[in-house]
Amino acid sequence: MSRTSVVTTLFLSALSFLPHTYAAANLVGNAGFEGAVAEGGMAEGWYFFKEAESAYTATIVDGGRKPGKCLKISGDGEWAGAACARRPRDRTKRCMGAGWLRVKGEGTATVKFDYFDAEGAFLGSTFSSHVRDARDWQICIVVSGAADYPAATQVSVAAVLNGSGTAWFDDFALIQRDPLANEGATNLLVNGSIEAGAGSKPAEFFTSTNDGADVTMAWSRTKPHSGLRCLHIKGQADYAVFAHKNVAFDRGKTYVASGWARIGGGRAALKIDFFKDGQWLGEGDPVVFEGEQWGRQELTVDPTKYPEANRIGVGVVFNGDGEAWFDDLMLEVK
Ligand SMILES: [Ca+2]
């Protein structure tokens, strides 16, 4: 069995514990950089790009995530990267791109999607988390939502180095599979499905706790509500918060937040935070999750709570001793 097919099999078996069986082939060719190297030194099937005038190089080197080769991008400038061949975008399906990376120096490394229209024109990109100073290989995942570049008919996944340094990349995947789920066009939260991120951290979320809290808050692959991953809080805390980046708030509209959780001790709730420009004003009344099985809660945002608010954030909060899992957070205008 070739290394490429081993990688593909690992991705398929990673999906096989899901309640539904997805036929999900890896659409990236030469995904582990074990194939031929083209003239100029780039892996066959991959395209090297960089900021004009910058001093970056991209080479295929020994020292992959598993014994074998990987992609190395190194140099000084604003950005450089390498993209796989474009693939047709099936807009009825959830689209996930993944790669493994490590990085050193001042710069950050990430994985992105590039979008193209039917004529092949470049429309833009969406990014996963930007990873800095990672000595060990870690996975980096980007998800394409229904609202991202609706005119796109083709997509490619790319390795990116921003700024100065050296990054290594290996074992890419581009998978389109059912269902579209919470990357739906109406969800104002980017990565509400918790599928995108890097290492142990979901993208677009940040954490806060009381002083003295003894908790871990991380991405989890343990029985997610949807897809492959969810949020997990475990330990003891007066409060531990996983909050999504705040979004613009129009007081004339009705916003409904919702989410799923399962509880193994302690108390877990869904809440709204109110902001005026960059400043936190306070929080609304939370709604508490119940039960060891996945259960949904929702709350309607009260616009009279903080009349000067122009941004709101959705978060989940854990209090007490135990653990809780969260998934599929949504914020919609009704
Ligand atoms: Ca999920």
Image (cartoon, rainbow, N blue to C red):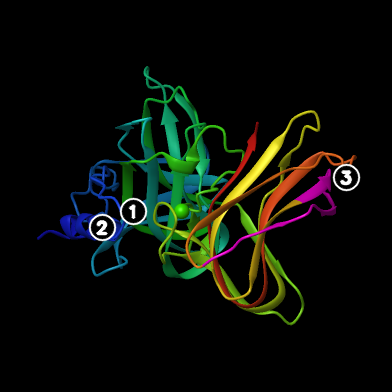
The mark that comes first in sequence, 3 or 1, is: 1
Camera-near label (2 vs 1) is: 2
- Name, please, the residue furthest toward the top: 119
Which residue, given by chain and number where applicable, does mark 3 sit on?
Answer: 306
Q: Which of marks 3 and 1 is in front?
A: 3
Mark drawn on residue 128: none
Disc 1: which residue: 59
Tell me, yes or no, whether the two marked residues, 3 and 2, touch with CB atoms within 8 Å: no
Where residue 124 appears, x then y in whole percent? 51, 31
The CA distance from mark 3 to mark 1 is: 54 Å
Residue 238 sits in quarter: bottom right
Using the image, determine if residue 256 lies above or below residue 327. Answer: above
Can residue 112 be seen at all in this image of the molecule?
Answer: no
Q: Which of marks 3 and 2 is nearer the N terminus?
A: 2
Residue 284 included in the magenta stretch of the image: yes
Q: Which amino acid does label 1 sit on?
A: Thr
What range is drawn magenta here? Answer: 273-291
Q: In this figure, which residue is indicated by the disc labeled 2?
A: 16
Spot occupied by residue 284 in the image (x, y as percentages of width and height): 79, 52
Q: Which amino acid does label 2 sit on?
A: Ser
